[in-house]
Amino acid sequence: MTDTGTDAQTQYVAGTVGDDVLTVHKLKATPNARGAATLEPVCPVPGAEPTQWLRAVNCADCLAVVG
Ligand SMILES: [Zn+2]
């Protein structure tokens, strides 16, 4: 599963979105030009600020999307 089409490598991290701290989503971390990463949940979550956590992903929707 090696994709060699892009220079910016997409990584996935775990994190919560908004006030729901029980559901840990898989967040797509897209590196931007300034070296920071834009975090975006891979499942449809109503717009809130994602927060990265060092926890295991437990959102079934996110787990179904990738891997
Ligand atoms: Zn999710």
Image: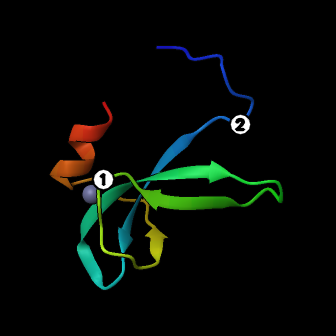
The C terminus, quarter of image: top left
Residue 56 numbered tag: 1
Q: Is residue 64 shown above or below 15?
A: above
**48 lies left or right of 46:** right
**58 lies left or right of 46:** left
Give the amino acid type for the residue marked by disc 1 in the picture: Ala
Give the amino acid type for the residue marked by disc 2 in the picture: Ala
To which quarter of the image does residue 11 belong?
top right
Return the x and y of residue 42 as percentages of the image width and height. Answer: 37, 51
Q: Is residue 20 shown above or below 4?
A: below
Q: Is residue 16 shown above or below 28?
A: below
Q: Residue at x 28, y 77 (%)?
A: 21
| Disc 2 to disc 1: CB gap under 8 Å | no
Mark 1 lies on a secondary structure that is loop
Ligand 1, what quadrant?
A: bottom left
Return the x and y of residue 63 as percentages of the image width and height. Answer: 24, 43
**16 lies left or right of 11:** left
**Looking at this rendering, what residue extends furthest in the left direction?**
60
Q: Residue at x 28, y 39 (%)?
A: 65
Q: Residue at x 36, y 81 (%)?
A: 18
Q: Residue at x 65, y 34 (%)?
A: 9
Q: Which residue is mark 2?
A: 8
Return the x and y of residue 20 as percentages of the image width and height. Answer: 26, 79
**39 lies left or right of 19:** right
Return the x and y of residue 29 as percentages of the image width and height. Answer: 56, 52
Image depth: mark 2 or mark 1 in front: 2
